[in-house]
Image (cartoon, grey):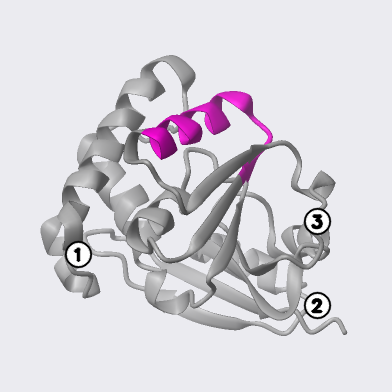
Amino acid sequence: MVSGLEILGIENKNSFVDKLLFYKDLLIKWNKTYNLTGITDEQDIITHHLLDCLSVTKFVSAKNIMDVGSGAGLPGLILALCFPDRKITMVDKVGKKTAFIQQVIGEFNLNNARVLNGRVEDIKNYKHYDGIISRAFADMETMIKLTSHLLLDGANWYGMKSKKSRDSEMITMKYSYHVDKIDVPHLRAERYLITVVNATN
């Protein structure tokens, strides 16, 4: 974990590593009962989940962020721990997942994070967020369609994608977009961040 943060240029402030490892332990504990993730090996959780989420932090400048289909709080909880001065709202329709996120928020006393249980298309915070991010929610066009009422004009959608997802989704993508290749420490897989600007008006 420490070497991964060093590669990403992230400082271990306020025992950041300890918090990430405690999150990992909570995820493993809850996963035995609630099946929150298919990745169960401790080292794989660090690389495939924690470092993967941290690898996009230098590209995400938004201050009031929604994480759609947050699952076990990825990347929302990791962003909230990394950026205590930013507001993070996580949304998932699965109650056991939002219960886990709420537990983590309580364990860390994260005043900058909150979680909503429900469908994102039913949320009424019109034009409220300056960034909407997703890691495993849907293809980019579906995410944009379901959340366009929530994103401020000129703000960004961020999609965390594998090479396979990037290649398949971008073939028919009707929005202009920007692609950043993400280098995840110790992970032998191509990862990308797709950024789309909300320029509908």
Q: What residue range appears in magenta?
A: 91-106
Queried whether the magenta region covers residue 95, the answer comes back as: yes
At numbered mark 2, what does the secondary structure look like: helix, strand or loop? loop
Crowd around label 3: few <14 · some 14–19 · many ≥20 (10 Å): some
| Residue denoted by label 1 | 5
Contact between marks 2 and 3 (CB within 8 A): the answer is no
At horizontal 53% and vertical 56% (from top left) the residue drawn is 88
| Residue denoted by label 3 | 146
Instruction: Tell me if 43 is positioned left or right of 59 in this view.
Output: left
Q: Amino acid at mark 1?
A: Leu
Which secondary structure class fits the magenta region best? Answer: helix
Question: Residue 90, percent across and down?
Answer: 58, 47
Residue placed farthest to the left in the image?
Answer: 3
Q: Quadrant of the N terminus?
A: bottom left
Question: Residue 171, percent across and down?
Answer: 71, 73
Instruction: Give the image quarter of residue 64.
Output: bottom right
At numbered mark 1, what does the secondary structure look like: helix, strand or loop? helix
At numbered mark 3, what does the secondary structure look like: helix, strand or loop? helix
Counting residues from the N terminus, which is met first, the one under dot 1 or under dot 2?
Answer: 1
Question: Residue 11, percent across and down?
Answer: 18, 69
Question: Residue 97, percent across and down?
Answer: 54, 30
Q: Amino acid at mark 3?
A: Leu
Instruction: Give the label on residue 141, or none.
Output: none
At horizontal 19% and vertical 64% (from top left) the residue drawn is 5
| Residue denoted by label 2 | 174
Instruction: Give the image quarter of residue 126.
Output: bottom right
Q: CA distance from mark 1 to mark 2?
A: 35 Å
Crowd around label 1: few <14 · some 14–19 · many ≥20 (10 Å): some
Q: Amino acid at mark 2?
A: Lys
Relative vertical location of residue 201 with respect to residue 173 in this rendering, above or below: below
